[in-house]
Amino acid sequence: DVKVTQSSRYLVKRTGEKVFLECVQDMDHENMFWYRQDPGLGLRLIYFSYDVKMKEKGDIPEGYSVSREKKERFSLILESASTNQTSMYLCASRSPRGLGETQYFGPGTRLLVL
Amino acid sequence: AQTVTQSQPEMSVQEAETVTLSCTYDTSESDYYLFWYKQPPSRQMILVIRQEAYKQQNATENRFSVNFQKAAKSFSLKISDSQLGDAAMYFCAPPVGGAQKLVFGQGTRLTINP
């Protein structure tokens, strides 16, 4: 089974702090994704990465950056946290096309910015 | 605009009955995968079923099946013999944003009545 882990389930930070959300997958997948989930808005793509050191903006990248130094790890960075970044953050890893291009999700990190 | 529409924000069904969740989308892709995910109260996103767009046969996974109408861009999920454990938020996810990017609908909250 694919395992995707996220560094924290719950996180409380203050406005202006730098926040790191870590995601690790154990299936050697090339593609990884960061989403945020808000009530009534579904999941929205922040950034994705299709290889080490490669990244592409999603639909809502403003206020976020990412890092992919190793294949198994994809980090989401909030350079200066703001209250409107309070949300649930979900990381996903995707299997290759020959195995169904399926995204497997981590358990999520619920971030509260005060 | 590229969209995914789940027209039923909430649905309720008696245990052991059958329920169908609807999803329509717009994409310019011709060869792609589509997905239904469920998110129970634990918030973990779990793959329910996957459909390959070039396959005419509708996908089936135990009690879960889809009705995929490619020309109509419709992708509904049927749950037979509903069980209490099926209660969750269900998200439709076609690659509306291009083959590399899924777009998630706003979700349908399914309640199972004993």
Image (cartoon, rainbow, N blue to C red):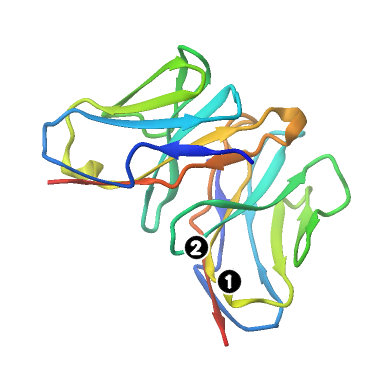
* Side of B19 relative to B45 (left or right): right
Q: Residue at x 78, y 63 (%)?
A: B62
Marks 2 & 1, CB-CB < 8 Å contact = yes
Image position of A16 (left or right of A105): left
| SS label for mark 2 | loop
- Mark 2 residue type: Pro
Marks 2/1 same chain = yes
Q: Earlier in the sequence, mark 2 or mark 1?
A: 2
Q: Residue furthest right?
A: B56
Q: Which residue is mark 2?
A: B40
Q: Where residue A77 sits in the image (x, y, percent)?
A: 29, 27
Can you give x and y, in whole percent of width and height, for residue B96 in the image?
60, 39
Disc 1: which residue:
B85
> Residue A39, located in which quarter of the rendered image?
bottom left
Which label is found at residue A14?
A: none
A39 sits left or right of B26 in the view:
left
Real-space Cα distance between discs 2 and 1? 9 Å
As displayed, is residue B67 above or below residue B1? Answer: below
Mark 1 residue type: Gly
Asked if residue B93 is positioned above or below residue B43 in the image, the reply reads above
Q: Residue at x 74, y 73 (%)?
A: B80
- SS label for mark 1: helix
| Residue at mark 1: chain | B
Quarter of the image that includes the N terminus of chain A: top right
